[in-house]
Image (tube, rainbow, N blue to C red):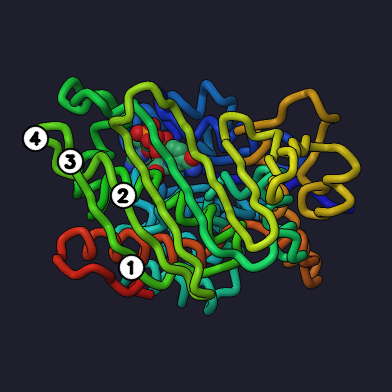
Amino acid sequence: MRRKLRMGMVGGGPGAFIGEVHRRASRLDGRIDLMAGAFDIDPEKSLEMGTSLCVAPDRTYREYKEMIEKELQREDPVDFITIVTPNNWHFPIAKECLEAGFNVMCEKPMTMTLAEAKELKSLVDKTGKVFGLMHNYTGYPMVKLAKDMVKLGDLGEILKIVVQYPQEWLARPIEKEGQQQASWRTDPKQSGVAGCMGDIGTHAANLAEYISGLSITEICADLTTFIDGRLLDDDGNCLLRFNNGAKGLLQASQVSIGTKNDLAIWVYGTDKSVEWHQERPNQLLVKGLGTPVEIWDRAYDYVTEKSAAAARCTRIPTGHPEAFFEAFANNYLNFSDTIFAALEGETPNELALDFPGVDAGVRGMAFIETVVESAASEKKWTSFKV
Ligand code: NAD
């Protein structure tokens, strides 16, 4: 009989954002229990968090190294460790977890540099451990439907992709007031060489490649820091070229007043186009030349019959919205099925392997470094660095 998977967590302390989303999403299917954690950079706050989450005192750790060491000594160690710290910690923690033999679920961007990302990929290949990267927007059923429609040829040949991720929350210098999430995101030592482009531009690039199945080959980028004194970009516009000759536009911004999390994508083929908005995630618009716009709704048979990946990630009937938590849960569903297969010595089925992993992480870091290089250069096009 299968037992539940045991999860450990690094990060997600009091007042943190995404750690709590992971905790809720990972338990949605009842197959994962949070058993251990080093939840905060401040050891006292880690203990406080463990108490509030009812994690056993002897498995609430003061720091992640202690968790790795002590969990290894147990008969029932955690099966995987989720990393939800600021970016600068992802690489050292992921590396130590993999070396110790743990599977890893890591937040994006995967590392601080492309070189680190490549090193992590070698380590994942060498250890054979399961590695997930939380590009959560790939977890939406209607995104999976769009991907399958492209794969089935419903759109024809892909000519153009427009993708955007505008937000407003950094339109004022709130990092100067000590706002937790803004403070580290605007600090190159904790965030990396890019600000907005690393934080959300990577989601947009990943979504374009995930749905289209194409790879970005060249970028022409223009990055801006609109807020005086801020050290990293808070807005960026990119022209993209893809490996099949398709062209693209990608814009991301954290100073676009009036928009909250308006990640949206338009994929144009020779026969049809699709359009998806994460603020209306249960619908996919499907459009033909000179025909009425079709609004496809999640969970109908015409969706689940076309896309097994969407069907697998659909929990409730149409009209009852599924959204952010479910998308994270869908990545955990596939990630955990892949771990189950490994534990049972079986090959995971193809649908279970449908979650972003270390390769997406390497491409994310290549995207960041290419965009920054392009923006600093007078050259029109910069080759994708990977
Ligand atoms: P946050 O500042 O809200 O939380 C970070 C937490 O990590 C804090 O509790 C902090 O104390 C803890 N921490 C820092 N260093 C640590 C260490 N060495 N050991 C243990 N704990 C440590 O940040 P956030 O907004 O939750 O972002 C965290 C990560 O998640 C970032 O990499 C970010 O890019 C990513 N993120 C992803 C999404 C998404 O949609 N996938 C959304 C938000 C954030």
Residue at the (32%, 59%) spot, across then down: 368
Q: Report the front residue among 186 and 56.
A: 186
Residue at left 27%, top 45%? 195
Q: What residue is pinned by disc 1?
A: 114
Looking at the image, in which quadrant does ligand 1 appear?
Answer: top left
Residue named by callout 2: 237
Q: Earlier in the sequence, mark 3 or mark 2?
A: 3
Three-letter code for the amino acid on which mark 3 is drawn? Thr
Using the numbered discs, state the Cα–Cα distance from disc 1 to disc 2 in whole angstroms: 21 Å
Q: Residue furthest left?
A: 229
Residue type highlighted by circle 1: Leu
How packed is label 1: few (under 14 Cα within 10 Å), some, or many (20 or more)?
Answer: many
Nearest-to-viewer mark from 2 and 4: 2
Q: Is residue 214 above or below residue 286?
A: below
Query: Where 381 falls versus 328 (above or below)?
Result: below
3D distance between C-alphas at marks 4 and 3: 9 Å
SS under mark 4? loop
Whichever of labels 3 and 1 marks the residue nearer the N terminus, that label is 1
Q: Which residue is mark 4?
A: 229
Marking on residue 134: none
The residue labelled by disc 3 is 225
